[in-house]
């Protein structure tokens, strides 16, 4: 996207300095460190298409939002 390499490296250091654990139906998964987010985003979109996951609404007429990505400034609401 044309960002300067030092800026991208700074953002990636911020993202990779944390770890996450996802809990689904009360079962805790393994810890993982985030990367760029494309893979997780694709999996979430696939789960929504298959009816396995539904997004959240902030009000009655708003779109369902299933996920937000940090540095990408990207909202997926399909």
Image (spheres, rainbow, N blue to C red):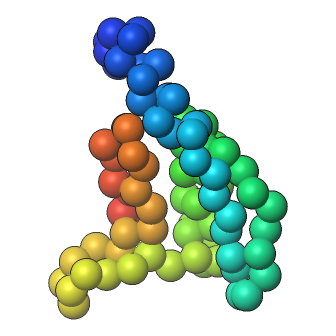
Which residue lies most toward the front here? 17
Query: Residue 38 location in percent, x, y?
Result: 56, 40
**3 and 56: which one is in front?**
3
Q: Using the image, determine if residue 16 lies above or below residue 51.
A: above
Q: Residue placed at 50% from the left, 79% from the top?
A: 54
Q: Residue placed at 33% from the left, 10% from the top?
A: 4
Query: Residue 3 location in percent, x, y?
Result: 32, 15
Residue 58 relative to residue 69: left or right: left
Q: Residue placed at 31% from the left, 81% from the top?
A: 57
Q: Using the image, determine if residue 58 lies above or below residue 45.
A: below
Q: Residue placed at 72% from the left, 51% from the top?
A: 32
User: Which quadrant would the C terminus be assigned to in this image?
Assistant: bottom left
Query: Residue 51 location in percent, x, y?
Result: 60, 77
- Picture quadrant where residue 77 is located: bottom left
Residue 44 visible within the image: yes
Query: Residue 23 location in percent, x, y?
Result: 69, 76
Q: Using the image, determine if residue 28 lies above or below residue 3.
A: below
- Picture quadrant where residue 43 is located: bottom right
Residue 11 relative to residue 42: left or right: left
Exactly how many numbered labels are in the figure? 0
User: Which quadrant would the N terminus be assigned to in this image?
Assistant: top left
């Amino acid at each position: 996207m044309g960002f300067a390499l030092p800026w991208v490296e700074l953002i990636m250091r911020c993202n990779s300095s944390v770890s996450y654990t996802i809990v689904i139906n009360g079962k805790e998964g393994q810890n993982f460190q985030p990367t760029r987010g494309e893979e997780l985003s694709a999996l979430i979109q696939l789960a929504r298409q298959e009816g396995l996951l539904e997004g959240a609404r902030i009000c009655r007429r708003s779109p369902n939002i299933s996920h937000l990505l940090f540095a990408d400034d990207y909202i997926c609401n399909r």
